[in-house]
Image: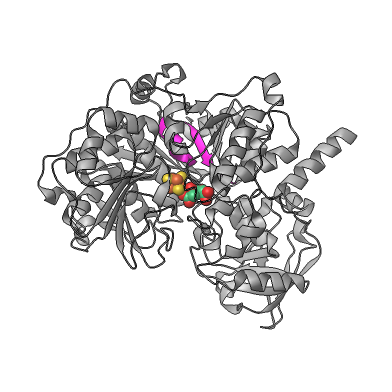
């Protein structure tokens, strides 16, 4: 029986476990990436492992998120990251060089290799036929130390693409359509593997838009084959040597098949406040728009921005609206400048933001009060823009332009302008001077790591043992995102290297009293519990959504179901993640209840959870593997690794 591409790449990298869906496997990681908002923690963790140099084939440290510098914190972090990269043998992509995912795709991604990144949109590089997975910073730190990455073998959903997109319809509309069908939890435990005749109608950046937003499906990753189009992209990047043809065997099997006829797709749009709240643009046309934002790691390739430039050429953005654009990389910016795109954007009145994540993560360009903003980004979670009551819609660059020109949600086909035909050049501008190459080992050893006062030491984790007695500090509904748990934005992001300081903002947009109440419970010697619904912790890979609650004394989270990366982060920082055996028991627990959880039988799968206030004993399920339980018992992943290496030395 033939293999699909996911099975082939996993097979080549498998170092432990049985690759049957749902069972734990360990894979060798070839490349890693970090960005500044998760990177400082990852390098503090790497430092504490005590190695002299990274053990991956290639690792890159990017600066793209924390670009506003309104005091010393962000620039201090950049300096720390540059010096750790130099010290430990990494590439360093300097601020201004671009968004990690866009730059990685352009300059480093290699078909058939594995990539682990401390950012949930790491699967962008899977557009080139790489197995690229998002994870918490701790898992990336361990991968840099040569520890294989452990995950549950995903099932593989084969997405068969047929047909060809119509004018004004683009890759974003494909992934929005898939999100409409599968929802934000439809990809948990799965890889979306694209195949079929429609694949060859999409260029690498279009494929990357789709794999990027596979993160919104909750998928482990998504992947496209590597074909002659991949080869042409790599040649244009002057990296043809990295090209190899890769695809599924003709008789490959998939666990599920989804068929998408590209010619049937229309412009789509995700309505507030979830990327799966998708409708056809024409169903919501006419909604007045106050802001349009174009860019992000989802849609800021050369083709995307030149499409925008062609559509706005000779026109100007609507009167009651502000529109802005942030190029994905310095390469894209230079090329649109050379080819006249930038001029068209400037004269159309678009605000040109610096190359980086920018307003996607609430770093400026927040919408007005209850303002409607249409964005070519990938997430529209409540409050993420910085304006709590903003109404965020997600759409293709084409639909963004239509909204920007008309001042209301408009199907781009209704503009009645000629469809832009963008010729992607055969050769891109290659200039890697903003990427610092790894130093040779001898020189690297002499580098001094530069730490600013904002970089606090890693907080201590505690081993899990016995009975946890405490209080349900918070009860939450379904689909809670890591943006709810640990918000980002211009005010909070600069505290990413300082867990005590950032922990003051845990659940800030849900319940401002949470940190105070949690710390009080901790001071009273009580364990903190949080109860959630389905898909708890979806969205970002930020491990601060585990680290900061841990710092506040949260010991266990009980939900109907977890999102993959968040559950792994909880375990890495010693927080027990359990699920209700019967989902309806969720209703029995209330915020403020006194509860007791006996963990002594965890290894045997025996758990007793008593809600003393409600006078009930509630059956829970532990879906953790033996390895994960060992990590919890050790007091988190770092303690576990150190314990294991001590055992090795002593044996
Ligand atoms: C995001 O898009 O939410 C982020 C900011 O890129 C995060 C990472 C982070 O929180 O630093 C992600 O996607 O993992
Ligand atoms: Fe940056 Fe937004 Fe992409 Fe996250 S989703 S990496 S914040 S551009």
On the image, the x and y values in percent for residue 132 come to 50, 36
Q: Nearer the viewer, residue 508 or 635?
A: 508
Location of residue 247 by image quarter: top left
Location of residue 403 by image quarter: bottom left
Q: What range is drawn magenta here?
A: 122-136
Q: Nearer the viewer, residue 130 or 194?
A: 130
* Left-right relation of 514 to 398: right
Above or below, comparing residue 442 to residue 557 in the picture: above
Instruction: Tell me if I can see residue 189 in this picture.
Output: no
Find the residue positioned furthest to the front. 71
Find the residue positioned furthest to the right. 650
Above or below, comparing residue 514 to residue 207 in the picture: below
Reply yes or no: does residue 132 show up in magenta: yes
Position of the C terminus by quadrant:
top right
On the image, the x and y values in percent for residue 442 come to 70, 19
Location of residue 394 by image quarter: bottom left
Reply yes or no: does residue 447 show up in magenta: no
* Left-right relation of 427 to 595: left
On the image, the x and y values in percent for residue 77 come to 59, 43
């Amino acid at each position: 029986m033939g293999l699909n591409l996911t099975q082939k790449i996993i097979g080549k990298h498998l170092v432990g476990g049985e690759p049957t869906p749902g069972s734990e496997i360990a894979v060798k990681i070839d490349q890693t990436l970090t960005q500044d908002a998760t990177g400082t923690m990852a390098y503090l963790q790497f430092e504490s492992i005590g190695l002299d140099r990274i053990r991956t084939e290639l690792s890159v440290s990017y600066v793209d998120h924390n670009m506003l510098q309104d005091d010393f914190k962000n620039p201090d972090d950049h300096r720390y990251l540059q010096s750790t990269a130099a010290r430990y043998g990494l590439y360093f992509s300097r601020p201004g060089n671009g968004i990690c995912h866009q730059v990685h795709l352009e300059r480093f991604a290699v078909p058939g290799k594995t990539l682990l990144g401390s950012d949930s949109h790491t699967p962008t590089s899977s557009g080139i036929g790489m197995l690229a997975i998002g994870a918490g910073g701790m898992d990336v730190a361990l991968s840099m130390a040569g520890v294989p990455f452990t995950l549950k073998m995903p099932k593989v959903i084969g997405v068969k693409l047929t047909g060809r997109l119509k004018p004004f319809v683009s890759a974003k509309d494909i992934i929005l359509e898939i999100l409409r069908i599968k929802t934000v939890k439809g990809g948990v435990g799965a890889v979306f593997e694209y195949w079929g005749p429609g694949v060859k109608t999409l260029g690498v950046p279009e494929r990357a838009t789709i794999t990027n937003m596979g993160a919104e499906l909750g998928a482990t990753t998504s992947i496209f084959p590597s074909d002659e189009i991949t080869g042409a992209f790599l040649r244009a990047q002057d990296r043809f040597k990295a090209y190899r043809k890769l695809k599924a065997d003709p008789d490959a099997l998939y666990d599920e098949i989804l068929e998408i006829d590209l010619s049937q797709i229309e412009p789509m749009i995700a309505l507030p406040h979830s990327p799966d709240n998708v409708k056809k643009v024409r169903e919501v046309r006419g909604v007045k728009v106050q802001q349009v934002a174009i860019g992000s790691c989802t849609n800021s390739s050369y083709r995307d921005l030149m499409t925008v430039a062609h559509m706005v050429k000779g026109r100007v953005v609507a009167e009651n609206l502000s529109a802005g654009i942030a190029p994905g990389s310095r390469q894209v910016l230079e090329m649109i400048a050379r080819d006249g795109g930038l001029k068209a954007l400037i004269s159309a009145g678009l605000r040109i933001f610096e190359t980086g994540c920018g307003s996607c993560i609430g770093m400026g360009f927040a919408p007005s009060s209850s303002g409607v903003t249409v964005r070519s980004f990938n997430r529209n979670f409540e409050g993420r823009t910085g304006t709590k009551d903003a109404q965020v819609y997600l759409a293709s660059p084409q639909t963004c332009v239509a909204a920007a020109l008309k001042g209301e949600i408009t199907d781009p086909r209704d503009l009645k302008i000629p469809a832009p035909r963008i010729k992607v050049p055969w050769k891109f501008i290659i200039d890697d001077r903003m990427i610092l190459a790894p130093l040779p080992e001898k020189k690297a050893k002499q580098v001094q790591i530069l730490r600013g006062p904002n970089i606090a030491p890693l907080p201590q984790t505690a081993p899990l043992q016995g009975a946890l007695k405490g209080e349900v500090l918070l009860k939450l509904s379904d689909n809670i995102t890591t943006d709810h748990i640990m918000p980002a934005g211009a005010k909070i992001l600069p505290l990413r290297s300082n867990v005590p300081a950032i922990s003051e903002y845990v659940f800030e947009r849900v319940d401002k009293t949470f940190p105070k109440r949690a710390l009080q419970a901790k001071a009273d010697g009580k364990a903190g519990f949080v109860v959630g619904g389905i898909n708890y912790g979806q969205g970002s890979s930020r491990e601060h959504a585990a680290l900061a609650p841990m710092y506040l004394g949260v010991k266990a989270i009980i939900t109907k179901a977890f999102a993959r990366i968040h559950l792994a982060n909880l375990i890495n920082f010693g927080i027990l993640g359990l699920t209700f055996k019967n989902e309806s028991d969720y209703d029995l627990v209330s915020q403020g209840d006194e509860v007791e959880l006996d963990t002594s039988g965890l290894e045997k799968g025996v758990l007793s959870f008593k809600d003393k206030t409600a006078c009930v004993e509630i059956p829970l399920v532990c879906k953790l593997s033996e390895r994960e339980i060992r990590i919890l018992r050790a007091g988190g992943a770092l303690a576990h690794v150190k314990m294991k290496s001590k055992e090795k030395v002593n044996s």
